């Protein structure tokens, strides 16, 4: 965010014409204007350019690419999408000279930047224009130089304009300063992303005007009849009535999906067939990175188990699953041991089940395995959004407003529990929240040092006063829960063992050891029709910075009041996720927040300066779900 301006193999289902056209181009840069990209039908895992060492020169420019049969300009790093794989060494000092060579008049310019996602560094090296530095102007360079304090799998991307959506991102691997505790015979980066032929700025404008453009899968009369047979007519009518009052649809799982996006794996489409070669019995390490702008991917390799060994670059106790969901900006390292067949499909479908990208693990290049069909499209329930289970007899009347929904009252049909109707929006953006550095608690929300055993219940959820009568807030959750053991909407009871947050346990104890001295609660808020997103109903321009005192340990509690998932990223510091009892569980740099969830994590304010704190769904960030964090003496 910039504040200045951002033949088919047997067993494979035949794709739609549109999907087939999207896959025609194997992907990659066009060699010259108007020329078809060079064929890469068996692109190998080694095709991604890799830069190693401590000195790096990176050039930000514009390159023509073709993923769909149409040639479009992308923002590239050293001429590629994704940018080169950077391999650093823990304990060294890296120097990166980044030059802005975007052409004059570029739709992606003029200024640029690089943010090193999840990396601990000084604030002026973080790469957020208008906050940590001024950005890199056309024809100019910026020198990034900092010590590498950590190891693991990370990534980097632009924080200027719409450049991240335009292709400006790349993988980052930091090798440990000693023997790697995660042993493997092969080591491959698998970077997932979403591409659109649209000018990203025009896509954003479309979202603001018609947020439901890609939600073409509406429920039908046939769905109503099936639901009535399964759940009973009264319950089905009540369900439809509730969704009607909310002016929302339970099929709205993603703002932008396969109707607009072409999904990429290491910069190539499914028909590009990225291939990672193995020898039977090899331990293959796959570094999964979700570098997409707006997409959650569900990843599996039919016929193979995935042993998760790291999350967001940090080691976790190994857990073996069949499938995992990776939110935008998250990374997972998994170990697989292929044997018994020559090829396996690496399959990543979007969470809304509108598209996929696939690659191959094979004993040699040019092989493929059957690609599974997309899973059935999921439906969001009231329980998913933290409103209980109406089919289990939950009283939904508390949600209902006696006044019908109108354009002038977007909250008709939604309860506003725990709010102060007289509090004017913007007069006190932190009403009900003590944000001062020395505060020991937040009014009405203090958990102190006590265990968080009541995180999931104990009455109606309170909400900040800034949400009351707020035209940017269209719903609030009533009974949020941590949902740490929930695999997620569309993944429950699918016959596969799916990773959950509850499975993730760091291999180390709480690195700080102190109980949090205070608690800050923030609500993730939004309005679906207006495509407005925020914290506590306040956009970035309305909100005061969240202030932390250098060295303090605090707890952040997030409550998702929306029907969308939000991956929340705090720059410069770790987010130490707590379990449902308030104990340290797993260290991450991006914390996923499903609809109707309430999760907490500890933060050690050990990095002075101004830091970005935002949803990593790109267009949610751009439309306001962004805060500034200030760590001060």
Image: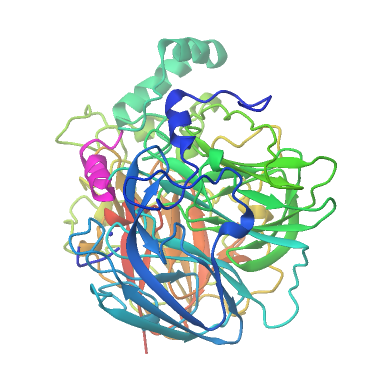
Q: Is residue 479 visible?
A: no
Number of callouts: 0
Q: Label the magenta part by its dominant secondary structure.
A: helix
Is the residue 548 above or below the residue 565 in the image? below
* Percent position of residue 328, x then y: 47, 53
Rendered location of residue 427, percent (x, y): 16, 63
Instruction: Report which quarter residue 107 is drawn in.
Output: bottom left
Q: Quadrant of residue 221?
A: top left
- Camera-nearest residue between 24 and 410: 24
Relative to 457, residue 540 above or below: below
For residue 368, side relative to residue 144 (left or right): right
The part of the chain drawn in magenta is: 199-212
Residue 49 seen in render: yes
Residue 633, compared with residue 57, is above or below; it is below
Q: How is the image coloured?
A: rainbow
In-front residue for pair 546/163: 163
Magenta segment: does it hold 454? Answer: no
Q: Say which quadrant the N terminus sits in.
A: bottom left
Residue under the image location 42 percent in, 29 percent down: 250
Coordinates of residue 611 in the picture (x, y in percent): 36, 74
């Amino acid at each position: 965010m910039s504040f200045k301006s951002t033949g088919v193999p047997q067993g494979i289902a035949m794709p739609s014409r549109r999907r087939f056209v999207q896959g025609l181009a194997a992907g990659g840069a066009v060699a010259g204007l108007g020329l078809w990209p060079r064929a890469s039908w068996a692109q190998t895992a080694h095709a991604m350019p890799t830069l190693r060492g401590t000195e790096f020169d990176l050039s930000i420019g514009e390159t023509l690419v073709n993923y769909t049969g149409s040639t479009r300009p992308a923002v590239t790093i050293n001429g590629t999408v994704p940018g080169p794989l950077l391999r650093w060494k823990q304990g060294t000092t890296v120097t990166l000279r980044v030059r802005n060579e975007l052409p004059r008049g570029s739709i992606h310019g003029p200024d640029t930047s690089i943010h090193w996602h999840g990396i601990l560094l000084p604030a002026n090296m973080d790469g957020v224009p208008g906050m940590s530095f001024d950005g890199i102007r056309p024809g100019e360079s910026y020198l990034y130089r900092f010590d590498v304090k950590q190891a693991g799998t990370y990534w980097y991307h632009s924080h200027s304009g719409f450049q991240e959506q335009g292709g400006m991102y790349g993988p980052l691997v930091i090798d440990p300063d000693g023997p790697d505790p995660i042993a493997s015979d092969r080591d491959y980066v698998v970077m997932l992303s979403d591409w659109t032929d649209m000018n990203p700025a025009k896509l954003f404008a479309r979202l603001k005007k018609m947020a439901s453009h890609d939600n073409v899968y509406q429920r039908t009369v046939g769905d109503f009849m099936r639901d009535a047979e399964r759940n009973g007519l009264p319950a089905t009518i009540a369900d439809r009535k509730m969704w009607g009052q909310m002016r929302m649809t339970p099929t709205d799982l993603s703002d932008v999906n396969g109707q607009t996006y072409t999904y990429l794996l290491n910069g190539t489409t499914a028909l590009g067939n990225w291939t990672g070669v193995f020898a039977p019995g090899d331990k293959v390490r796959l570094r999964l990175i979700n570098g997409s702008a707006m997409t959650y991917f569900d990843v599996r390799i039919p016929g193979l188990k995935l042993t998760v060994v790291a999350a967001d670059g940090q080691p976790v106790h190994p857990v073996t699953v069949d499938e995992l969901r990776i939110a935008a900006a998250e990374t997972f390292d998994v170990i697989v041991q292929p044997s018994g067949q020559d090829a396996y499909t690496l399959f990543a479908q979007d969470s809304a089940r509108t598209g996929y990208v696939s690659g191959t693990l094979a004993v040699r290049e040019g092989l493929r395995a059957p690609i599974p069909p997309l899973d059935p499209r999921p439906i969001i329930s009231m329980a998913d959004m933290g409103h209980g289970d109406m089919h289990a007899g939950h009283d939904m009347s508390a949600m209902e407003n006696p006044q019908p929904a109108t354009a002038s009252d977007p909250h008709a049909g939604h309860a506003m529990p725990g709010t102060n109707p007289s509090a004017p929006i913007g007069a006190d953006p932190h009403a009900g929240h003590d944000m001062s550095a020395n505060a020991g608690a937040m009014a009405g929300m203090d958990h102190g040092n006590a265990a968080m055993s009541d995180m999931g219940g104990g009455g109606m959820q309170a909400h900040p006063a800034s949400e009351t009568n707020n035209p940017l807030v269209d719903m609030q959750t009533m009974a949020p829960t941590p949902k740490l053991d929930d695999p997620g909407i569309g993944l429950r009871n699918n016959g596969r063992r799916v990773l959950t947050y509850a499975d993730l346990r760091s291999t180390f104890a709480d690195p700080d050891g102190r109980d949090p001295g205070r608690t800050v609660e923030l609500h993730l808020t939004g309005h679906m029709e207006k495509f407005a997103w925020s914290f506590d109903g306040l956009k970035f321009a309305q909100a005061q910075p969240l202030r932390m005192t250098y060295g303090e340990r605090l707890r952040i509690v997030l409550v998702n009041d929306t029907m969308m998932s939000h991956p929340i990223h705090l720059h410069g510091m770790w987010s130490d996720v707590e379990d449902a009892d308030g104990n340290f569980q797993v260290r991450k740099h991006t914390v996923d927040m499903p609809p109707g969830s309430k999760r907490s994590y500890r933060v050690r304010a050990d990095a002075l300066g101004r830091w970005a704190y935002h949803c990593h769904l790109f267009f949610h960030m751009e439309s306001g779900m962004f805060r500034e964090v200030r760590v001060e003496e």
